[in-house]
Amino acid sequence: MVVVRRATEADLPAIAAIYDVEVLHGISTFATEPSTLDYWRERLDSTHPGDHVLVATDADEVIGYAYSGSYRPRAAYAHTRETSVYLAATARGRGVGRLLYDELLGLMRSDGVRLVVAVIALPNGGSQGLHRACGFERAGVLHDVGRKFERWIDTELWELRLSAEVSAGP
Ligand SMILES: CC(C)(COP(=O)(O)OP(=O)(O)OC[C@H]1O[C@@H](n2cnc3c(N)ncnc32)[C@H](O)[C@@H]1OP(=O)(O)O)[C@@H](O)C(=O)NCCC(=O)NCCS
């Protein structure tokens, strides 16, 4: 049975292993060097409102993760968070991405996040399908913004407004 829960320190090697397959063999991330545990620990340790790291497990094995974190570091972006979701190849196409995102977006909504941004490198029909299914809308395309494996790559920005209320906060 697939379970979605908050990630712990013990999950970080499995999270890194799932991500690093895409780092080394895919274009969904523009990273080209395998990630370090410190890279993941920084996300896990974030105390910024709206930031979470979740894992999906099946028979106690981590089969995917999703997280929310900084979109851009400038202070005025504080109420905007960027999300990311990766599954092991064998876990795709059976609703696990949706389970992770539904849980993550619910937490972010409770935290008062105003805008969620996702950046999708093309082509990626699975990610476009997931984001569309979760209510995101396509906000625009950056052409040839990346180059990996000797190819120019476009990215799409997708956005989801979680809260349109005027915030009294800073
Ligand atoms: C992108 C990814 C997370 C999607 O997760 P998933 O578990 O395969 O997706 P789900 O099975 O939960 O599908 C979610 C929705 O997207 C739709 N969808 C999935 N794949 C699709 C495709 N290729 N084309 C169109 N729609 C698709 C599903 O129909 C579903 O819609 P529904 O909830 O209305 O039925 C997963 O494929 C993955 O890890 N890919 C590699 C890493 C990656 O690209 N991450 C995203 C970086 S931006």
Image: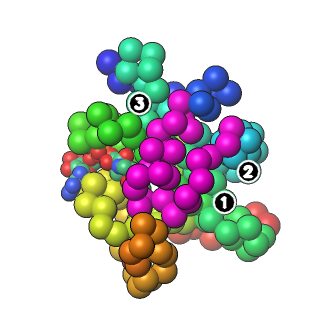
| Disc 3, SS | strand
Quadrant in the picture for the N terminus: top left
Give the label, 2 or 1, closer to the camera.
1
Residue for badge 2: 48
Foreground pick, 161 / 68? 68
Q: Image check: 48 left or right of 106?
A: right
Coloring basis for residues: rainbow
Label 2 environment density (alpha carbons within 10 Å; few <14, some 14–19, many ≥20): some
Dot label at residue 88: none
Asked if one can make out residue 132 in the rendered structure from this viewpoint, the answer is: no
User: Which residue is depicted at the point 67% across and 43% down?
Assistant: 36
x and y percentages locating residue 33 in the rendered image: 59, 53
Q: Amino acid at mark 2?
A: His
Residue for badge 3: 63
x and y percentages locating residue 77 in the rendered image: 69, 70
Asked if one can make out residue 5 in the rendered structure from this viewpoint, the answer is: yes
Residue for badge 1: 70
Foreground pick, 165 / 90? 90
Q: Mark 1: is the Cβ under 8 angstroms from ligand 1?
A: no
User: Which residue is depicted at the point 69% across and 46% down?
Assistant: 39
Q: In the image, is residue 89 above or below residue 169?
A: above
The magenta-colored residue range is 14-37
